[in-house]
Amino acid sequence: MSEVHPQVQRVVNAAAAHELTLDVVEFPGGTRTAVDAAAAVGCEVGQIVKSLIFDVDGHIVLALTSGANRVDTAALAALAEGSRCGRADADVVREVTGFAIGGVPPFGHAHPVRAFLDPGLLSFEIVWAAAGTPRHVFPIEPAKLESVAGAVVGEFAESD
């Protein structure tokens, strides 16, 4: 058996703390984008969880968005009770989450982050999320994702 990547192990440990066992799958070709991930997994793009980090009035938040949607920054700012919202840069993402863009998981971050969940993900029985690297993903029921991520479900996404 091959050694587990340390970033993946962090995500597995975070799930285990919530009594959840993850079935992490590695795709050597990578799953950096929602389209790449859906093709690798063999699912709809909408079943891919994009874990995106935003800055809302100086506070970092996590938007768990369906791969078929994009974040409406004004709606996310309002949901987070702020006024201005923009994407966090790569350095901030790594500092706050401990992961690089393209592999940010929905939980297991270096620092606590307020999370918001796109209700579009709740229409699926299973969704797929990054497991700490651009090559590793795992399936999860949306309700479990919501629970483990401590996410608030709210309208902040629109169709791509």
Image (cartoon, rainbow, N blue to C red):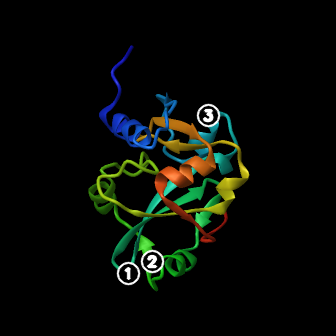
Determine whether label 1 and label 2 are within 8 Å by CB: yes
At label 2, counting other C-alpha atoms closer than 10 Å, the crowd grade (few under 14, some 14-19, many 20 or more) is many
Name the residue located 68 percent from the left edge and 54 percent from the top edge: 122
| In this view, 45 is above or below 2 | below
**Distance (Cα) linking label 3 and label 2:** 31 Å
> Element under label 1?
loop
Determine which of the numbered discs, if any, sits on residue 139 in the image: none
Name the residue located 65 percent from the left edge and 47 percent from the top edge: 47
Kind of residue sitting beneath label 3: Val
> Element under label 3?
helix
Q: Position of residue 131 (x, y in %)?
A: 44, 40
What residue is disc 2 on?
85
Kind of residue sitting beneath label 2: Cys
Q: Is the N terminus in the top left, top right, bottom left or bottom right quadrant?
A: top left
Name the residue located 67 percent from the left edge and 34 percent from the top edge: 42
Q: Is the C terminus in the top left, top right, bottom left or bottom right quadrant?
A: bottom right
Q: Where is residue 46 in the image (x, y as percent from the top left)?
A: 67, 51
At label 1, counting other C-alpha atoms closer than 10 Å, the crowd grade (few under 14, some 14-19, many 20 or more) is some
Near-viewer residue (72 or 8)? 8
Q: Where is residue 27 in the image (x, y as percent from the top left)?
A: 50, 30
Determine whether label 1 and label 3 are within 8 Å by CB: no
| In this view, 100 is above or below 116 | above
What residue is disc 3 on?
41
Relative placement, left or right, of 108 versus 22 is left
Kind of residue sitting beneath label 1: Asp
| In this view, 107 is above or below 61 | above
What residue is disc 1 on?
57
> Element under label 2?
strand
**Distance (Cα) linking label 1 and label 2:** 7 Å
- Please identify the residue farthest to the front as the structure is shown: 19
Q: Which of marks 3 and 2 is nearer the N terminus?
A: 3
Determine whether label 3 and label 2 are within 8 Å by CB: no
